Image (spheres, helix red, strand yellow):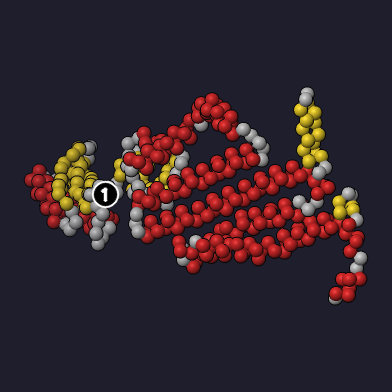
Amino acid sequence: MNTILLAIDWHFIDNRIGGERIANLLWCAGIILAAFLLKKPLTKALTFITSKLTARFNTQRRNRELEETIRKPLGALLQTILFYVAISQMGILLNHLVLHRYKDDSKLEITLSDVADHVFLFFTILFVTQFIVRLLDFFFQLSLEKAQTEHNRERQQLLPLMREVTKMFAWTMSFFWILGSVFHVNIPALITGLGIGGVAIALAAKESVENFFAAFTLLSDKPFQTGDSIKMGELEGVIESIGFRSTRLRHADGSVFVIPNKNLVSQTLENQTQRNMRRVRVPIAVRYRLAPGDLSKMISELKEMVTKTAQVLDPVEVNVETFGENSFQVMVIYHLPYPLTGTTLNTVKQEINLQLFDIVDRYTGPKPSSKA
């Protein structure tokens, strides 16, 4: 093998193709080939090291999830670095001008080297930010699951919004970093300009800004938390999440309503989870053929039955309310504890409704028209 290597005339690598030494071209091709061949094992090694550094914060199963989460941005970052190192080997080619312009006494010259440097910087910032954001997202998810296990509803409500704020901050800093380092924008001057143009932007995004600040109002005042059951006008359901712009409400039939945060702040809503009892109203239509004395007895018996039913709380009311053309309405109102223990609302209502029907049927004869 050594004899073959010594027999090769290595002086040919000093020859030039298009002004570039063959040695530099070989180095460039070799590093690019290595980037494709070594990307997967090097990425796997880097993700393994990262997961080991964060092992104290998660489990073995979570370590594998973390590796899957950060593998793509790490691989892209590693490949970008190797490509830049490969292209940097070609000194003559990189010195070629791609833009040459004179204006007054100033001169603007941009070479391929300048383009390569700025493209490399752009993708490096992009992939580093993506790596950081994915890492933050992973740990916020861990914290959220821990809060759910501990039934800490305050943290369940706060963590998703904090996650979005942190991710938005990271991408905003990345955006300004790219503007300053890649495009050489004067960031202080830009921020000053935004102070003037911010009024116009705020007016254009007035509704979004209102919803954004309404989200923080909801978090600070805490009229409800994630998992609470609320009622607002015709809408009723369980709060799933509070975001920058809107809050997601899950209805009993499984449908999801997306409500702008400003509506939740500006309108009256009922937090049904914070109540300690629930009122139930049962209207009963009774025909006029019932005698006044029997009506009084029936009302007394209805009230006694409901009062003695398990889970029912005071006060219990049974009153004649309205008179129609063929019948009058008896309203039964009772209260149940919230939440119920050992049973469900529908079970208790069904038990009481059946007994109500039995009593009314005994006094009125034929089956009355009733609804519960």
Look at the image and tell me whether residue 47 can be seen.
yes
Residue bearing the label numbered 1 = 372
In which quadrant of the rendered view does residue 1 lie?
A: bottom right
**In terms of depth relative to the viewer, which is nearer, 358 or 33?**
33
Residue 20 falls left or right of residue 192: right
| Residue depicted at x 58% and y 49% | 129
Dot 1: element: loop
Amino acid at dot 1: Ala
Q: Position of residue 81 (x, y in %)?
A: 68, 54
In which quadrant of the rendered view does residue 39 lie?
A: bottom right
**In terms of depth relative to the viewer, which is nearer, 127 or 293?**
127
Q: Is 284 located above or below residue 324 in the figure?
A: below
Which residue is the extreme one toward the top?
A: 104
**In terms of depth relative to the viewer, which is nearer, 238 or 86?**
86
Q: Position of residue 130 (x, y in %)?
A: 58, 50
Q: Position of residue 192 (x, y in %)?
A: 55, 28
